[in-house]
Image (cartoon, grey):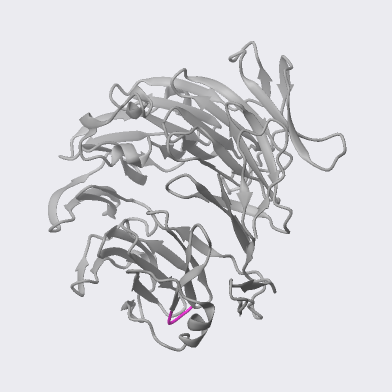
Amino acid sequence: NISKAMQEESAPVQLEFTNTIIYGGRKQLKSNKGTTYDLYNKNNKNVFPILSYSPNSTYIAIGFKNRVFIRDSETLDIIKLFVCNGTVNRIGWNDISNKIFVLMLDINTIQIFEINELELQQETDIESNNNNKTDSKELKGSNVENLVSCSWLNEDRLLVCTDYCLSFFCWDFKNDHLVLLPIPKYQNKGVSIFNDYIIILQRENCSDYITILDVSNWNLIKKFKLNTEDAQDVKWISSFSFVVWETSIYYRLFVYNINGKLENSFEPESCVDTIGLRMISVPNKHVLSSNNNDSIDKEKYGGKTLELICLGSYDDNLRIINHLTWKLILNVSHPSIFNRKEHNKNVIVYYESFSQDLKSTIFKIDDSEEIEFEEKEIESNNSNLNHGIKIMKWSSDNTLIATKSENKSNLLWIWNVKKLTLECIIKFFKPIKQFAWKINNENKLAIVVGNNKLYLWNRDGCSCFDLNQDIELNNIEYRNDGESLLLIGNNKFCCCYF
């Protein structure tokens, strides 16, 4: 059942693809025993698969209709099946991969399933146990308050928010206990957790407030008023400080310490009369989440890049600031006309092309002195702010940043953070849907653009792999060990292995 993917010229790695697993189609899944298990949904022929790798890289959880399948991440064999009380809308693993929550909006319920000593089951056994109710913890919302979001706080506790932020609480399902928390300003953002502390952004009496709690006992650490007009979000940047930034109307960024003291602020002079921040990115979590930052090998993780914050703006500029000195160290645009005299002459510009037989995709290098890119026109009367930097991601070693501008959605820009220069531009036929850096300190980038191809980049070159399947890839997810990659379409997914 393994077929080697077609490898094009200058491909940096070799991949193998498993069988494509279809959700919402008529294809049936067959076990090694030959027994079939039909996942076709007659009422909905275009069901988006809800799936995620476990943090320990051992399993894949897949939500479909009222069921959650647990598959082995190497063989894709079904090793556990949970039957839920309603339609699965969202799933999530805890950090140690022994529990999974299931959010079901149609019945306003959250279920917790425990996964201990998973044993491989034959599909005949799964079919026979479909009517048996699996033991689980369950939380049901009231008739007034609809459950809309949830996330893990730790191994045995969930943070849950209801519609319109009517309530926000912690569900300790191990002790069957609920703790009401301060109501956040937003239901899907405005909350940040670091070690034993949680920050909650609130709105009271037409002003923004920050509440800091100790999650071990829920004691109040600090509550204070912010110097903001309309705060958008909050994020930890170190073990003792965090940043708050304004909505798109203002380009303002504030940094506070855990005692509520305003340490510094950032407002570039060039952005006084323009719309502001769209997104903010800090170095990877595996660095910031360390309990002892002094023990980190900083050279391994990009050295002084740990002190940087990247700002993606609606004005199509990438700005990098040092959160210790709060100096702007890089301010670069995503130009429509790329001139090598104004940038690093060593920048490599790849563009997607066809081979001579027109049967495969290859990448060629454009070494012209000046290259013009197509740019989407911005409608001044359109209230939808669908422009500026939309995606911005650090490499796993924090030395490179990849960005996508919505104004030039078929271009991928790769910046060298150590040298503060542009390193590479990749031009595709279609707009970029998503990209992801390989984990484990390898500067390898995977990209999907809504077709049936997987694109890969590293410093050795670009390559394209054709899945030879009827699938439109819209999302990708790396396994935590970096050895496998989920390729996700609207109603199908498949795995590839490095």
Residue 31 sits in quarter: bottom right
Q: Is residue 86 magenta?
A: yes
Q: Position of residue 485 (x, y in %)?
A: 54, 49
Horizontal side, residue 427 vs residue 235: left or right? right
Q: Residue at x 61, y 45 (%)?
A: 15
Horizontal side, residue 191 vs residue 295: left or right? right
Q: Residue at x 32, y 64 (%)?
A: 98
Single out the residue that lies furthest toward the right.
Answer: 357
Q: Name the foreground residue: 154 vs 218.
A: 154
Prevailing secondary structure class for the magenta stretch in the rendered image: loop
Q: Is residue 98 above or below residue 315?
A: below
Q: Position of residue 235 (x, y in %)?
A: 32, 43
Q: Position of residue 72 (x, y in %)?
A: 47, 62
Q: Residue at x 34, y 40 (%)?
A: 286
The magenta segment:
84-88
Q: Name the foreground residue: 305 vs 232.
A: 305
Q: Residue at x 55, y 37 (%)?
A: 445
Q: Name the foreground residue: 296 vs 208.
A: 296
Number of labelled discs? Answer: 0
Residue 284 sits in quarter: top left
Q: Position of residue 383 (x, y in %)?
A: 58, 48
Q: Is residue 423 above or below residue 117?
A: above
Q: Name the foreground residue: 250 vs 350.
A: 350
Residue 216 sits in quarter: bottom left
* Quadrant holding the C terminus: top right
Q: Is residue 358 magenta?
A: no
Report whether residue 248 is seen.
Answer: yes
Single out the residue that lies furthest toward the top.
Answer: 341
Horizontal side, residue 48 vs residue 136: left or right? right
Report whether residue 230 is seen.
Answer: no
